[in-house]
Amino acid sequence: PSLEYEQLRRKIETQARELSYFTNNELQKISEKLSENDKFKWKQVIERFNDQSRVLLASIRNLTNVDGYQSWREYEHKALSKLMQTRLNYLQNPSKPCTDVKRLICKINKDCGYGCQIHHVMHCFHIAYALGRPMILFSEGWQYNRGGFDQIFQSLSHTCNTSMVYNVSIWDQNEIADVIEIPSADFLKSLKDFMPMAIPEDLSERLIRLHGNPFVWFTGQLMKYLLRPQAWLTQFLEEKYNTLKFETPIVGIHVRRTDKVGTEAAFHDISEYMKYVEDYYIIYKYQNPNINVSKRVYIATDEPLVFDDARTKYPDYIFYGDKSVAKSAQVNSRYGTESLKGVLSDVHFLSLCDYLVCTFSSQICRIAYETMQQRTIDGAWRVQSLDDVYYFGGQHDHQQRALISHKAVKPKEFSFERGAIISAEGNHWNGFSKGSDKTNNQSGLYPSYKTEEIVRIAQMYHYSEV
Ligand code: GDP
């Protein structure tokens, strides 16, 4: 398929969703002002609109089944994944002795949860990839497994290890030293071009054609290498898969509560998740009218009460997941291998779902989404966040381009011309996004459908050896 075809196909899904967020929200607002009698009639109008939106999305999602390009997509996904894994294997196992190559080190022991620690290591790994320096990971005394990372995941290298680390310079202070340590993204003084959400220039055309969010696919591949399970972990996950009787179609929800609520995220009731789950299944039914589906939901959460709440309120669903895992996820239990096995299995099963409803403010939701891209073909659309848009901690400005000029209608909006570069801060999932146009110091709300994402492209190490 042409690049233009793939982009247009994805754009139609995004635009249909934006249209539905906007209209639904506006129709609801009108409803609040109506008398009881009119409210009832109006509700039918809203229902009809929602149903037509779902029919439209079903048609859009069926496009890839009939356009004749799906086998190409599968082939290209596999080929690029193989190329990425070969490059990473080469990066981590240089042909010269490790002490003869420039290398970098990263320390996993950041004072935060699993998702935050893994994303910190990923931040280092992105720099390793871009510079062509193998990464040596320090993980002794790791809160989730005192014996270190290598007991859980395969060793990152056969040739480089922590004994090959001396004369360490902090990257910010000396970029050319043989051994550099990567500080946490929060402490970096400046951002290099190649840092998230950049994709490598030499693969950019292929990645942009392959995937609706090329950076997520790219970082998913780095994560695939980083988190190659040890044999015992593979077996543990397989056994769990069989005991759960995991079956598709299935939607995954990640309900992040306890310490996150009120500090870094808002409380979201189970009904907010289930609204999107219901949508997914109605659309699925329109896509596949002859299949009789059971509505399955995988729940991952750090709040054990979510299971009873969901089962009581949604009796026509089959809920998967494990209350004891949720207990091991509560704020004071987040250390040791039991808790680690819990979060690893939750992320694993979320990533095997057909669709995710979660909060991108949580690093667990982001890891699940990134991991999902290792398996699904062009699966950027397979998520609904209840809060943030996707991001990577410490990233560059998230930029969009205005496709259509906008004249502010309400006081909170701002105006821009077609072609303006907008720094996007968030999508309110009601038709509006928040952001700013830094060239003229304007900021506020704007209609999300008037902009498109800009993919950041940067020069990185070329791996011409492989
Ligand atoms: P964030 O705080 O949600 O951005 O993610 P972090 O991973 O940095 O910290 C939260 C920690 O809480 C995780 O690492 C887990 O230990 C635990 N946790 C949160 N949600 C879940 C979940 O759904 N399942 C499991 N097993 N653990 C979770």
Image (cartoon, rainbow, N blue to C red):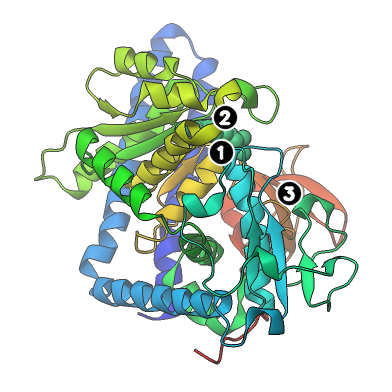
Label 3 element class: strand
Q: Position of residue 223 (x, y in %)?
A: 51, 60
Label 1 element class: loop
Asked if disc 1 is less than 8 Å from ligand 1, the answer is: yes
Q: Specify the label residue 397 is tagged with.
A: none
The N terminus: image quadrant: bottom left
Residue holding disc 1: 144
How far apart marks 1 and 2 lie (CA) works out to: 7 Å
Callouts 1 and 2 close, C-beta under 8 Å: yes
Mark nearer the viewer, 1 or 2: 1
Horizontal relation, residue 36 to residue 293: left or right: right
Q: The disc labelled 3 sits on which kind of residue?
A: Gly
Residue holding disc 2: 334
| Residue located farthest toward the top when viewing the structure as drawn | 36
Horizontal relation, residue 105 to residue 330: left or right: right
Q: Position of residue 348 (x, y in %)?
A: 39, 45
Q: Height in image: 462 above or below 16?
A: below
Q: Height in image: 244 above or below 444?
A: above
- In this view of the protein, can residue 428 be seen by the observer? no
Where residue 400 sits, quadrant-wise, is bottom right
Q: The disc labelled 1 sits on which kind of residue?
A: Tyr
Label 2 element class: loop
* Residues packed near mark 2 inside 10 Å, few (<14), some (14 to 19) or many (20 plus): many
How far apart marks 3 and 2 lie (CA) works out to: 35 Å
Q: Specify the quarter for ligand 1.
A: top right
Q: The disc labelled 2 sits on which kind of residue?
A: Arg
| Residue for point 61% across, 87% down | 96
Residue holding disc 3: 435
Q: In front: 455, or 118?
A: 118
Q: Position of residue 279 (x, y in %)?
A: 33, 36
Between disc 3 and disc 1, whose residue precedes? 1
* Residues packed near mark 3 inside 10 Å, few (<14), some (14 to 19) or many (20 plus): many
